[in-house]
C-alpha cells in the first residue's frame, strides 16, 4: 500500500493543478454557480428554464447537480473556491486510495497494487475536474468497498447511493453495479442464501435510494432519457472511446488485458467479479466518461489475479517492501509532485484562462439585450450572469428541447441551413473559436461583422446591432 | 446442443444472403490486378450472376464459422462450447455483411488457425499452401504472417527448446512472413492486400471504422462478448502461449479498426470458449468422424443453399450498390467525360471510382496506405475545414467534393463559388460554379 | 533436421540482409526528406537532410517503406540468426553468413541519422588540428572540401557541432578521417570497414570469455546479431569500440590481469561513459577477493585516465568524457509520463533526473547484490533517450551469460530495438509512437525473461495442462 500511496500523491499533485485553475477552463462551473445562487436565494430548485435563454424559456429542467451547485455557489460567495477544488482532489485521491485498499484486501501484492493504481490514475486523468461526477467516483468506490466487505456494513452502501444521487445522476449506475454483484453471488451460491438475500435487498434498496432526492423519480427518468438522447452526440464526454484515447490505452486497457489473461470469475468462485467485469466492459464502450468508473471496478480484480504471477514473496515485492526502497520512492514522489506543481502552475494551458470570459463581458457592454449563440454551448454559461445576454443554448444542455438542439447543431456543424437558423431565432451575436468552420462561414456573410477578437475567440454581430464604437480588440 | 453450431452457421449464412448488397471495397478488389479473387469473382458474376456470388459469400461465411467451431472441437471441447464460439463469432461478423472478398479471408483465417494447431508435415504443407492461396486470392497474407509468427513464438515459449514442433511452426512462420511482406502495398507487384491489417487506418485522413460508435451496437456486443468470455475464464487457462498472443494481438487490431473484428471473433472466440470448456469438461474427446466427412456434409448443404438462392433470384450481373455509396453522384460527375479529381468526405465513398469511371480520380480512397502524405493531409484538413484547406484542395487539383448534405465543408464551399450539382438525399456533389 | 534448420536459417539470415540492402537501395529513389533544422523547446533536435550526401541520410522523410523494410527484414534476420545460434552450422557456413552480413552492412545504401557525418566532423577537425570539443571552424588555411561540406551540414548552434564522446572515440574518427583523405564517401565506407573489423575482433574475443556451456562458434556468432551489423557497421555507430574494449577487459580479468582490465575499462569509458560501470564491478569484486589486485587496478585505472587525459589535452585541447547525453522528446519513460501529466518540456530535465535517480538506485542495488548480469539493462533503463544502437550493449550478454533468462531477455531487447529507428526516419517522434516503442522495448524482454522463469516453475499452466484433468 505504501508504494501505492506514493503514486497516489503524484496523481494528487496533477489533480490539484487541474482543480486549482479549473474555473478558467470549464464553462459548466458558471451555470452551476448560477444554479447554486438561485437555490440559495430562492430556497427551492428551479424546475424550468427562465428567460436567460431565448430558445426555450419555460422548458422543464431536472437540475440533477443541485447539491454540488449549492456548495459551489456558497464557497465561491465566500471566496473559497479553493476548498471545492481541494474537495475534488480529495475525492479523486480517495477513490484511488480505495482502489488500492480494495486490491490490498484481496491479497494483491505490492507490485500489483501499485500497478493497478497507476492504471486507474491514468484512466481518471483526462476526466478529472472540479465536477460533480468526481464525487460520484468516490461514492462508487465506497459502494464497491462495502460490497467487498460482505458484512453488516454493506447497507451503508445505501447511504452512499442516496448521497450520490443528490450530487450527480451517475448514481443510477449503482443499482446496475449492485444488481450485477447480487446476481453473481446468486450464481455462485446456487441457492437463496443469506448473502444473496442481503445483496438483492441492497440492489432493490439502491433503486429506492436513487430517488431520495428533491427530484424524486424524475432523476432516474432523466438519466434513462439521457442515455438515449440525441444531445449526447454533441457532448465530448459522451463520445465513444477509441484505442488512441490515453485514458483507455494507458489506463483501462492494461487492466482488461490482465483480467482476460488470468481470468477472474471461474470456476464458480468469483462470478460476482465476472458480472461486474461484464458491466464495466459494456459501459466503457459507451462513453469516455465511463472509463474511470470501469477502471475502478476492474482494478482490484486485476491486481488480485496479477498477484498470482507476481506473488508477494517474489523478489520485486520483497525489494518494494524494504524501507530503503520505500523511502526512495517517497522522495522521488515528492520531487515529482513538486515538478508537476511548479511546471503546471506556469503552463498557460493549465494556469491560463481558456474560456472566453473577456469576450462575453465585452459583448455585455453593448447596450440592449442580445441573443447570443455560442459555438461551444458551455461558453454561454458565462453569459448567464449578464442580465442583457440571453443564450441560445448553454451548459445546462439537458433541458433544452430536441428542436433547439437540432438547430444548435445545424449551426455548429455549419450545415447549409445555418444562416436560416440564426435568422429564425433572431440571433444577433455569435461567439466562435477563431480557427473553426463557423468563424470562416460568418466572415463570408455580408450581414455579419466582426465585433470582437482575441487570440482564440471572435464575436460576430449582426449588422443591425447598435454599437457605439467599433470594438475590435 | 450438438448441432447448434451448425444451426448458427446456417442462420448467419442466411442473414448474409438476406443482406444483399456489396461492400465498397469490393469495387477496388474486383479490379485489383494482383488479387485473383477479384477476377474470379468478376468471372462468377458474369457467368452465374449476382445471386450466385452472394450465396457463395454466405456459404464461405458459414464455413468460416464452422471451421472456428471445428477448431475447438479438435481440442476436445463439447458441443456447448462450440456453440458458444459460433455465437460469439457470428455476432462479430455481422457488422461486415455484404459481398466482398472478406469471406474468403475469413474462411482462410479460420482454416489457417486449424492447421496451425495440427502437427506433422501434412499440416505444415497445408498451412503454407493455404497462405499462398490466401495471398493470391484475397491478400490476407499479412494476417497469416502475424498468426503464424505468434503461433511460433507461443510454441517456442511453451516448448522451451527448438524441437520438431517448434521447427515446423518456424517454417510456417517464415513462409508466411515472406508472403506477408510481399503483400504489402509497396512490394514489387504492388499488391494492396488486406490493408496490411488495416493499420493504414491510423494515417490521418484515412478511412477508419471505429469499434465503438456510441450506444450499444452489434460490433460492441460482439467484442464485449468475446472479452467477457475470455476474462471470466482466462486465455492462459489451457497453457498455450500462442492462444494468449493471438488473442491480444487480434484484440488490438479490432480496436484499431472494426474491419478486423470478424477476425477477432473467428480466431479469438474459440480460444475463449476453450478456456471456458477447460473448467467444465472432465475429459476431452476429439471428434471421431474424419474431416472429409464433415466437409462432404457441408458441401452438400452449401450446394443446396446456393441452389435455392440462385433458383429464386433472377440472374443479374449488376449488383445493388450499398445505400451508403454515392453511385448516383459519381455517375453524374463522370457524365461530362472530363477528368475530375474528387474528394469524398468518407474515403470509402470513393472506392472504385476510377475503376468504374475512368475519368474520375479520387483524392483518397479506402487504400490510405497508397495515398501520399500531402493527399492524406489535404483530406483531413478539408473534412475538418481546418488550416489552409482551400489552398490544399486547390493544390491537389480537387474539382469535385462529395460530402454529407449537412457537412460544414458544404456550407463553406457553397459560400465561395461552389455549387451543389446533385444530391442523393444523404449526400451532395459540389463542383466549382465556373464548371459547366 | 537440425542441419536443414540451420541451413534454412542461414539462408534466411543472408537472404534477409541482402534483400534489405537491395530493396532499400531501390526504394530510396523518390524519397523526399525535409531540409530542416529546428530546436524543440530548449532541446536541440537533430537536423534532417535529404539525399544530397554521398551516403544519404534518411531522417524525417515521407517514406514509410524504408523503415518498414528495415524493421521487417531485420526481424527476419534476427530469427535466422537465433536459429543458427541454436543449431550452429559448420564453421565455414557461419563464416560465409558473417561475411555476407558484413558485406551487406558495408554496402548499405543509407544511414538513418547524421551521426556518421558528425563523427566525420570530429575526425576531420581533429585531423586538421582543431578541437572537436568546441564549435569553431578549423584553423587551417585550406580547409578540406569534406570539412566545408560538414560545416554546411552542421551549422553553428547544431547539437552535433561539439563532440559528445570521449577522446578514444575521437581518436578512432581521426584515424579514419586521415585514412579517407578528403572524401566523405570514403570516410563513411572506411568507418564501416573499421567497425566491421572491430566486430570481427569482438567475435574473436567472445570466444575467450564465454561460459563453458556456450560453444566457441556460438559465442563468436553472437557478435553477428543483425542489430550489430546494422547499427555498428552499416550506420557507423561507435559503441562497438566500447564493447570490444570491455570484452578485452573481461578477457584480461579472466587471465588474471586486473590492472590491464582496469586500464581497458577506462579506455572504454572514454568511448562511452557508461562503460565506467565496469570499473565499479571490477573494484567490488577485487575488493572482496584480492585487495592487492584492487590496488593495482586502481593505480592502472588512474594511470590510464591520467595518460589519456594528458594526451587529450595536448592533442584536442580538452579532456572530457563527452557532453550531456542526448535527449529525445518522449523517448524516455519519464518524458512520456510527464507528458501524460501535461508537464511541459521545460521541466523535462527534472523528469529525467527522477528517471536517472531510479536508474542509479537500481544500479546501486544491483551492484550491492552483485547481480552484474542485469547492469546493462539497468543502464538502458536510466537513459534519457532510447535509440536502437544502445541496445547493442546487450548483445554480448547473449554469449557471456550462463543464465538463460538473461540471454533470452537480451536477445528479445536487441531484436526488437530496430523499431526505434522508425520514428527518427519518419518524423513520427510523438508520444503515442514512442509509447508503443518503449512499451515493446521494455515489456518484451521482461515478458520473455518472466516466461522463461515461469515455464521452468512446477506450477506453470503448462504443467497444469499436462495433468490428466483440469
Image (cartoon, rainbow, N blue to C red):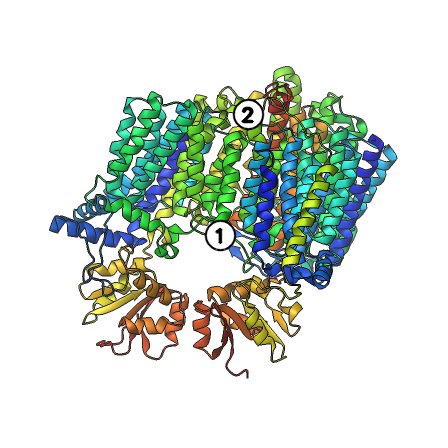
Q: In this picture, is C365 found above or below B295?
A: above
Q: In this picture, is C34 found above or below C171?
A: below
Q: Mark 2 points at which residue?
A: B279
Q: Circle 2: is it few (<14), some (14-19), or many (20+) Cα within 10 Å?
A: some
Distance of mark 1 from mark 2, alpha carbons?
A: 58 Å
Q: Mark 1 points at which residue?
A: C42
Q: Circle 1: is it few (<14), some (14-19), or many (20+) Cα within 10 Å?
A: few
Q: Residue at x 50, y 28 (%)?
A: A306
Q: Position of residue A407 (x, y in %)?
A: 33, 66
Number of marks: 2
Q: Residue B278 carries which label?
A: none
Q: In this picture, is A96 found above or below C284?
A: below
- Residue nearest the observer in this picture, B303 or A34: B303
Q: In which quarter of the image is residue B249?
A: top right
Please state if B264 lies on the left or on the right of C3 as rendered.
Answer: left
Can the viewer see residue C205 in this picture? no
Q: Where is residue C394 in the image (x, y as percent from the top left)?
A: 66, 34
Q: Which chain carries label 1?
A: C
Q: Quadrant of residue A422?
A: bottom left
Please state if B393 lies on the left or on the right of C402 as rendered.
Answer: left
Q: Residue at x 76, y 34 (%)?
A: B168
Q: Which residue is drawn at 34% across and 46% down?
A: A18
Q: Residue at x 76, y 33 (%)?
A: B167
Q: Where is residue B126 in the image (x, y as percent from the top left)?
A: 77, 40
Q: In this picture, is C335 found above or below B401?
A: above
Can the viewer see residue A95 in this picture? yes
Q: In the picture, which quadrant includes the C terminus of chain A?
A: bottom left
Amino acid at each position: 500500500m505504501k508504494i501505492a500511496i506514493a503514486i497516489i500523491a503524484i496523481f494528487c499533485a496533477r489533480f490539484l493543478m487541474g482543480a486549482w485553475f479549473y474555473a478558467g477552463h470549464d464553462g459548466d462551473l458558471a451555470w452551476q454557480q448560477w444554479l447554486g445562487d438561485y437555490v440559495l436565494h430562492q430556497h427551492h430548485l428551479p424546475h424550468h428554464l427562465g428567460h436567460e435563454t431565448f430558445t426555450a424559456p419555460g422548458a422543464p429542467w431536472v437540475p440533477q447537480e443541485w447539491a454540488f451547485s449549492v456548495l459551489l455557489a456558497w464557497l465561491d460567495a465566500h471566496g473559497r473556491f479553493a476548498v471545492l477544488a481541494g474537495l475534488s482532489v480529495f475525492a479523486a485521491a480517495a477513490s484511488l486510495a480505495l482502489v488500492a485498499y480494495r486490491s490490498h484486501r484481496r491479497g494483491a501484492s505490492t507490485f500489483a497494487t501499485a500497478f493497478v493504481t497507476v492504471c486507474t490514475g491514468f484512466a481518471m486523468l483526462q476526466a478529472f475536474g472540479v465536477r460533480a461526477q468526481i464525487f460520484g467516483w468516490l461514492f462508487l468506490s465506497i459502494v464497491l468497498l462495502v460490497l467487498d466487505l460482505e458484512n453488516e456494513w454493506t447497507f451503508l452502501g445505501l447511504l452512499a447511493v442516496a448521497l450520490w444521487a443528490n450530487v450527480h445522476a451517475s448514481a443510477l449506475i449503482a443499482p446496475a453495479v449492485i444488481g450485477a454483484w447480487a446476481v453473481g453471488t446468486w450464481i455462485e451460491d446456487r441457492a437463496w442464501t443469506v448473502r444473496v438475500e442481503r445483496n438483492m435487498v441492497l440492489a432493490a434498496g439502491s433503486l429506492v435510494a436513487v430517488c431520495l432526492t428533491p427530484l424524486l423519480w424524475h432523476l432516474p427518468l432523466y438519466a434513462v432519457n439521457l442515455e438515449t438522447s440525441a444531445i449526447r452526440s454533441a457532448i465530448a464526454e459522451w463520445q465513444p472511446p477509441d484505442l488512441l484515447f490515453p485514458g483507455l490505452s494507458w489506463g483501462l486497457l492494461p487492466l482488461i488485458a490482465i483480467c482476460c489473461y488470468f481470468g477472474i470469475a471461474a470456476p464458480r468462485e468469483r462470478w460476482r467479479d465476472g458480472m461486474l467485469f461484464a458491466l464495466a466492459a459494456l459501459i466503457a464502450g459507451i462513453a469516455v466518461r465511463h472509463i474511470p468508473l470501469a477502471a475502478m471496478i476492474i482494478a482490484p480484480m486485476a491486481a488480485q489475479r496479477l498477484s498470482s504471477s507476481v506473488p508477494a514473496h517474489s523478489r520485486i515485492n520483497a525489494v518494494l517492501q524494504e524501507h530503503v526502497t520505500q523511502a526512495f520512492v517517497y522522495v522521488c514522489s515528492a520531487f515529482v509532485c513538486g515538478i508537476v506543481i511548479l511546471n503546471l502552475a506556469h503552463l498557460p494551458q493549465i494556469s491560463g484562462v481558456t474560456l472566453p470570459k473577456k469576450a462575453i463581458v465585452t459583448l455585455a457592454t453593448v447596450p440592449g439585450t442580445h441573443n447570443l449563440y455560442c459555438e461551444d454551448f458551455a461558453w454561454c454559461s458565462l453569459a448567464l450572469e449578464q442580465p442583457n445576454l440571453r443564450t441560445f443554448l448553454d451548459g445546462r444542455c439537458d433541458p433544452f428541447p430536441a428542436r433547439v438542439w437540432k438547430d444548435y447543431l445545424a449551426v455548429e456543424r455549419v450545415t447549409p441551413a445555418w444562416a436560416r437558423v440564426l435568422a429564425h431565432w433572431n440571433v444577433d451575436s455569435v461567439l466562435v473559436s477563431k480557427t473553426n468552420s463557423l468563424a470562416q462561414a460568418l466572415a463570408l456573410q455580408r450581414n455579419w461583422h466582426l465585433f470582437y477578437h482575441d487570440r482564440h475567440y471572435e464575436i460576430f454581430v449582426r449588422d443591425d446591432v447598435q454599437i457605439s464604437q467599433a470594438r475590435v480588440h | 446442443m450438438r448441432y447448434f453450431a451448425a444451426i448458427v452457421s446456417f442462420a448467419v449464412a442466411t442473414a448474409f444472403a438476406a443482406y444483399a448488397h456489396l461492400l465498397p471495397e469490393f469495387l477496388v478488389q474486383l479490379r485489383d490486378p494482383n488479387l485473383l479473387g477479384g477476377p474470379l469473382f468478376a468471372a462468377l458474376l458474369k457467368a452465374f450472376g449476382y445471386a450466385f456470388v452472394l450465396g457463395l459469400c454466405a456459404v464461405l461465411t458459414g464455413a468460416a464459422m464452422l471451421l472456428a467451431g471445428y477448431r475447438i472441437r479438435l481440442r476436445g471441447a463439447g458441443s456447448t462450447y462450440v456453440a458458444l464460439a459460433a455465437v460469439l463469432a457470428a455476432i462479430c461478423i455481422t457488422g461486415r455483411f455484404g459481398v466482398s472478398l472478406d469471406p474468403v479471408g475469413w474462411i482462410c483465417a479460420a482454416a489457417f488457425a486449424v492447421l496451425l494447431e495440427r502437427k506433422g508435415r501434412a499440416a505444415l504443407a497445408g498451412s503454407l499452401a493455404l497462405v499462398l492461396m490466401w495471398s493470391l486470392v484475397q491478400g490476407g497474407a499479412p494476417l497469416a504472417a502475424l498468426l503464424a509468427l505468434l503461433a511460433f513464438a507461443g510454441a517456442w515459449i511453451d516448448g522451451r527448446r527448438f524441437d520438431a514442433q517448434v521447427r515446423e511452426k518456424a517454417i510456417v512462420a517464415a513462409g508466411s512472413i515472406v508472403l506477408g511482406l510481399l503483400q504489402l502495398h509497396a512490394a514489387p507487384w504492388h499488391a494492396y492486400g488486406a490493408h496490411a491489417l488495416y493499420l493504414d487506418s491510423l494515417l490521418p485522413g484515412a478511412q477508419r471504422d471505429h469499434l465503438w460508435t456510441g450506444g450499444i451496437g452489434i460490433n460492441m456486443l460482439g467484442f464485449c462478448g468475446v472479452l467477457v468470455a475470455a476474462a471470466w475464464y482466462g486465455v492462459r487457462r489451457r497453457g498455450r502461449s500462442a492462444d494468449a498472443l493471438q488473442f491480444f494481438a487480434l484484440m488490438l487490431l479490432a480496436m484499431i479498426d472494426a474491419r478486423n473484428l470478424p477476425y477477432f471473433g473467428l480466431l479469438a472466440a474459440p480460444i475463449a470458449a476453450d478456456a471456458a470448456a477447460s473448467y467444465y469438461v472432465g475429459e476431452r474427446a476429439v471428434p471421431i468422424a474424419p474431416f472429409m466427412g464433415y466437409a462432404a456434409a457441408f458441401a452438400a448443404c452449401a450446394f443446396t443453399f446456393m441452389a435455392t438462392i440462385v433458383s429464386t433470384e433472377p440472374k443479374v450481373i449488376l449488383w445493388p450498390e450499398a445505400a451508403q455509396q454515392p453511385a448516383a453522384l459519381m455517375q453524374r460527375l463522370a457524365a461530362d467525360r472530363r477528368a475530375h479529381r474528387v474528394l469524398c468526405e468518407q474515403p470509402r465513398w470513393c472506392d472504385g471510382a476510377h475503376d468504374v469511371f475512368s475519368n474520375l480520380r479520387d483524392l483518397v480512397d479506402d487504400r490510405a496506405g497508397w495515398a501520399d502524405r500531402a493527399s492524406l493531409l489535404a483530406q483531413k484538413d478539408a473534412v475538418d475545414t481546418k488550416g489552409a484547406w482551400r489552398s490544399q484542395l486547390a493544390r491537389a487539383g480537387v474539382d469535385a467534393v462529395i460530402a454529407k448534405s449537412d457537412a460544414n465543408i458544404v456550407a463553406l464551399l457553397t459560400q465561395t463559388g461552389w455549387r451543389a450539382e446533385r444530391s442523393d438525399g444523404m449526400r451532395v456533389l459540389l463542383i466549382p460554379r465556373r464548371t459547366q | 533436421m537440425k542441419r536443414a534448420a540451420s541451413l534454412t536459417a542461414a539462408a534466411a539470415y543472408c537472404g534477409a540482409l541482402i534483400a534489405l540492402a537491395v530493396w532499400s537501395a531501390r526504394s530510396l529513389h523518390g524519397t523526399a526528406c525535409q531540409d530542416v533544422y529546428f530546436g524543440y523547446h530548449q532541446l536541440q533536435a537533430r537536423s534532417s537532410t535529404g539525399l544530397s550526401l554521398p551516403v544519404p541520410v534518411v531522417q524525417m522523410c515521407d517514406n514509410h517503406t524504408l523503415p518498414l523494410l528495415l524493421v521487417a527484414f531485420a526481424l527476419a534476420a534476427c530469427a535466422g540468426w537465433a536459429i543458427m545460434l541454436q543449431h550452429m552450422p559448420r564453421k565455414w557456413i557461419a563464416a560465409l553468413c558473417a561475411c555476407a552480413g558484413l558485406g551487406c552492412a558495408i554496402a548499405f545504401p543509407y544511414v538513418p541519422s547524421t551521426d556518421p557525418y558528425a563523427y566525420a566532423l570530429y575526425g576531420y577537425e581533429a585531423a586538421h588540428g582543431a578541437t572537436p570539443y568546441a564549435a569553431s571552424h578549423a584553423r587551417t588555411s585550406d580547409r578540406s572540401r569534406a570539412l566545408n561540406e560538414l560545416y554546411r551540414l552542421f551549422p553553428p548552434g547544431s547539437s552535433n557541432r561539439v563532440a559528445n564522446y570521449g577522446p578514444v572515440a575521437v581518436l578512432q574518427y581521426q584515424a579514419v578521417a586521415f585514412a579517407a583523405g578528403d572524401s566523405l564517401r570514403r570516410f563513411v565506407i572506411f568507418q564501416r570497414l573499421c567497425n566491421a573489423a572491430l566486430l570481427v575482433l569482438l567475435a574473436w574475443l567472445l570466444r575467450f570469455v564465454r561460459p563453458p556451456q556456450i560453444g566457441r562458434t556460438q559465442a563468436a556468432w553472437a557478435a553477428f546479431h543483425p542489430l550489430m551489423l546494422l547499427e555498428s557497421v552499416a550506420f557507423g555507430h561507435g559503441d562497438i569500440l566500447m564493447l570490444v574494449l570491455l570484452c578485452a577487459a573481461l578477457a584480461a580479468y579472466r587471465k588474471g590481469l586486473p590492472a590491464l582490465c582496469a586500464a581497458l575499462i577506462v579506455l572504454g569509458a572514454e568511448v562511452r561513459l557508461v562503460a565506467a560501470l565496469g570499473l565499479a564491478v571490477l573494484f567490488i569484486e577485487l575488493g572482496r577477493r584480492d585487495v592487492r589486485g584492487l590496488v593495482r587496478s586502481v593505480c592502472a585505472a588512474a594511470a590510464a585516465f591520467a595518460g589519456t587525459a594528458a594526451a587529450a589535452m595536448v592533442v584536442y585541447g580538452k579532456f572530457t568524457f563527452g557532453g550531456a547525453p542526448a535527449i529525445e522528446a518522449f523517448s524516455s519513460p519519464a518524458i512520456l509520463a510527464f507528458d501524460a501529466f501535461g508537464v511541459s518540456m521545460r521541466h523535462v530535465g527534472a523528469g529525467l533526473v527522477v528517471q536517472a535517480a531510479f536508474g542509479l538506485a537500481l544500479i546501486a542495488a544491483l551492484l550491492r547484490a552483485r547481480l552484474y548480469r542485469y547492469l546493462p539493462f539497468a543502464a538502458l533503463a536510466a537513459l534519457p533517450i532510447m535509440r536502437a544502437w544502445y541496445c547493442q550493449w546487450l548483445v554480448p550478454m547473449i554469449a557471456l551469460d550462463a543464465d538463460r533468462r538473461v540471454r533470452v531477455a537480451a536477445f528479445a531487447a536487441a531484436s526488437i530495438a530496430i523499431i526505434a529507428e522508425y520514428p527518427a526516419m519518419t518524423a513520427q517522434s510523438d508520444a503515442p509512437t514512442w509509447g508503443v516503442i518503449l512499451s515493446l522495448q521494455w515489456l518484451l524482454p521482461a515478458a520473455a525473461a518472466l516466461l522463461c522463469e515461469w515455464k521452468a516453475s512446477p506450477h506453470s499452466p503448462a504443467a497444469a495442462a499436462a495433468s490428466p484433468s483440469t
